[in-house]
Image: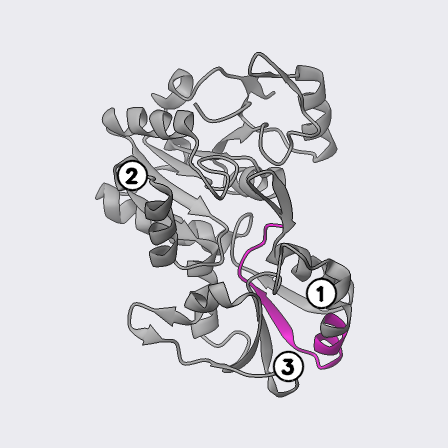
Amino acid sequence: MTRLINNLAEVAHSYDALFVDLWGCLHNGITPFDEAVDALQAYKAQGGKVLLLTNSPKPKSVVVAKLDQMGVSREIYDEIASSGDAAQIAMTSGVVGRKVFHLGPERDLGFFTDENGPIDVERVPLDMAEGIVCTGLFDDARDSLEDYRLTILDGVNRGLKLLCANPDVLVDVGDKRLYCAGALAEAYTAAGGTSLYYGKPHSPIYELAYTRLSAVAGRRIDHDRILCIGDGINTDIRGGVAEDLDTIFITGGLAATEISETAGIPNERELANYIASHELSPTFAISRLR
């Protein structure tokens, strides 16, 4: 049964490390949430390790730069593992070939570069591609999924696999809700294609996270001492449950329109109905990270 909590400090002493989502949990894509920053700072002051676990299609270096730009201090986290990192590793291994069609905005071109420079993958038009790398919509502020119907059908008919660098379907940027790469990957699968996922809730990103966490902690941390925090029921929570990790569900993010709150406390009936409809049971729930 999911337990409502008032703040992270109530339960933090039971865990040696946190896997913390970014969008909807630590920031809204524009500004950080002060209460979340304070909560992580207090947790680290007590000796806990914080790994930011994000479905961003961007590699770690780009995520760090974005957090710096937002004013998120590097002192509140120890390490980062992104869907972009895990997907980039897979792309480098050739899972969708060496000639790929990039389905995504120009701002994601950093996905094709690592610390050693450009990755040995050539971006080509769809009719020359061996596979598709999807980091998002070309213009997520204006495009609809219908705009991609012909591209999707063309890729499926060519038998191309689609590597999804961000399994998130939706994200809140400020007060706007936008489609992510996961929405295109779902549509691609529904049209009969094969979509490959490397972010939450799928295991590759967790394997990367465990490796990076062990490196900064100087030891392996048991699963029962790791707590996952996030607002995505089908990504953060489903992934944490699948990995046998305890979870905190942030109800004031993606689920805010379905779970109301009073004085910062989620409505228990609406919360129960919501998690039952997803056949999941987070360990804890809170309106926002604080």
- Gap in angstroms between the C-alphas marked 3 and 1: 14 Å
Residue 256 appears left or right of 90? right
Q: Nearer the viewer, mark 3 or mark 1?
A: 3
Residue 22 highlighted magenta (yes or no): no
Which element carries disc 3, helix, strand or loop?
A: helix
> In this figure, which residue is indicated by the disc labeled 3?
126
Say which quarter of the image contains residue 172: top right
Q: What residue type is labelled 2?
A: Ser
SS label for mark 2: loop
User: From the viewer's perspective, is residue 117 above or below residue 105?
Assistant: below
Residue wearing tag 1 = 188
* 149 up-or-down from 211: above or below: below
**Which amino acid type is shown beneath numbered disc 3?**
Leu
Residue for point 41% across, 24% down: 35
Q: Quadrant of the C terminus?
A: top left
The answer to which of marks 3 and 1 sits earlier in the sequence is: 3
- Residue 271 visible (yes or no): yes
Residue at x-position 61% and y-position 20%: 1
Part of the protein shown in magenta: 152-169
Q: Nearer the viewer, mark 2 or mark 1?
A: 2
Q: Provide the residue designation for mark 2.
A: 73
Report if the CB atoms under discs 3 and 2 are less than 8 Å apart: no
- The earlier-in-sequence mark between 2 and 1 is 2
Residue 179 position, x and y percent, is 65, 52
